[in-house]
Image (spheres, grey):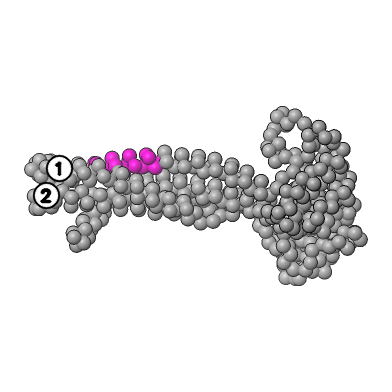
Amino acid sequence: MFSLAKENIKIAFDSIKSQLLRTILTVLIIAIGIMALVGILSGVSALENTISGSFASMGANTFNFQRYEFRAQRQSSRERQKVNPILSYRNVKDFIESYDYPFTNVAVSFTGSFASEVKYENKKTDPEVLITGSNEFYIENSGLEIEQGRSLNFADIENNNAVCVIGSDLQKALFPDENPIDKIISIRGSKFKVIGLIKKKGSTFGNNQDLTAIIPIQKARSIFTNPNINYRLSVKVDKKDMLEGAQDDAIITFRNVRGLNPIEKNNFGIERSEDLINRVAENTSTLYIAAWIISIITIFGSTIALMNIMLVSVSERTREIGVRKALGAKSKTIAFQFFMETIIIGQLGGILGIALGVLIGWGVASAFDLQFSTPWVAMIWATSIAFIVAVISGLYPATKAAKLDPIESLRYE
């Protein structure tokens, strides 16, 4: 039995080789469907990994105050009925003075500039460095890690020290062969001593999070005097079971800071990193569904094409089937041969489609600075689908070949 199966597989390969052009075209048709599935799923997965990773780095026990709710930020200005005031320095300062919930750290920060030039001796960067003014809790609450040196501390903030913590890319630009700690850099004409180096974080949607410098908030306010600066508040709770209580108390405190009466709606937004991650998952699930629909349509076309080509092959080899039957080949042997041909072509198409799909996913991730990961789930699905396509496409042609009458087959021209 095994030797017969081995012989049939050998005949199937020989038949495939004899019709090389047709086989290549058939494999490409299947590969396109599988490529669409793996490519789209891996691209969506890279997008989800990047966004979720950015929010997850803030920690599960963190919530943030902002000008608008996350959903409201996505609405157009016409849809937005109410313009919320910015989070002013007075707001965040009053909040810090009033909010005393236990086991919490409140970080306050603002973006001084997205495109500053930073100098060190005779070296200088392009004007693309992100400068952030913050208090001592910002680095911890943002999920950043200190690789070398130390973070900003209470004394730095209270004494308005001229110190800074820099990102890894800024370190490479200014100190390629030196230890940056205790070096003096210049930001907008002001001198700062480097006290810490942030561990590399990577880019998100082209936004380089490592080309940055973080300085004490009062120093930043003296350098960047833009009107209507919108500050950020981030609250981290040490104990997760106290998160709900801390958030409720924070909302009440900030409502009091804003002078809202009990019947007025919040004129600010508050978001937890967990909520943002869940919303990302909801949005990407829609993309996954769309990817499956597109891929299924493409694969359905591949199934029809493969079945049609195998039917043509049966018709062209009618005389061969008659000869084999006349020499004693059983119907199930003939059926197995054609069935194996279909399976082999289907798997070749699946392998090629997976390879192309992974390359497409990697290319999209590289182009948009996304976190690419090998799409094992998509690859398993693709392999299974390629096999199912081959089975469905091969059953009818194999059955038709097995039922051919040997006498009529021998007469076929």
Q: Is 69 situated above or below 139?
A: above
The region drawn magenta spans: 298-314
- Residue 206 appears in the figure: no
The spot of residue 120 in percent (x, y) is 81, 63
Q: Amino acid at mark 1?
A: Leu
314 or 48: nearer the viewer: 48
SS under mark 2: helix
The spot of residue 203 in percent (x, y) is 66, 54
**118 with respect to 328 (left or right):** right
Q: Is 137 situated above or below 266?
A: below
User: Could you tell me how far apart the alpha carbons at marks 1 and 2 are, in whole angstroms?
Assistant: 9 Å
SS under mark 1: loop
Residue extending farthest to the right is 159
**Quick one: quadrant of the C terminus?**
top left
The spot of residue 60 in percent (x, y) is 68, 53
17 or 140: nearer the viewer: 140
- Residue 302 appears in the figure: yes
Q: Residue at x 79, y 66 (%)?
A: 150
**130 with respect to 278 (left or right):** right
Magenta-drawn stretch contains 300: yes
Q: Residue at x 44, y 42 (%)?
A: 295
**178 with respect to 135 (left or right):** left
Disc 2: which residue: 325
Tag 1 and tag 2, C-beta contact below 8 Å = yes
Disc 1: which residue: 404
* Earlier residue among tags 1 and 2: 2
Residue 138, quarter of picture: bottom right
**Quick one: quadrant of the N terminus?**
bottom left
Q: Residue at x 54, y 40 (%)?
A: 286
Magenta-drawn stretch contains 116: no
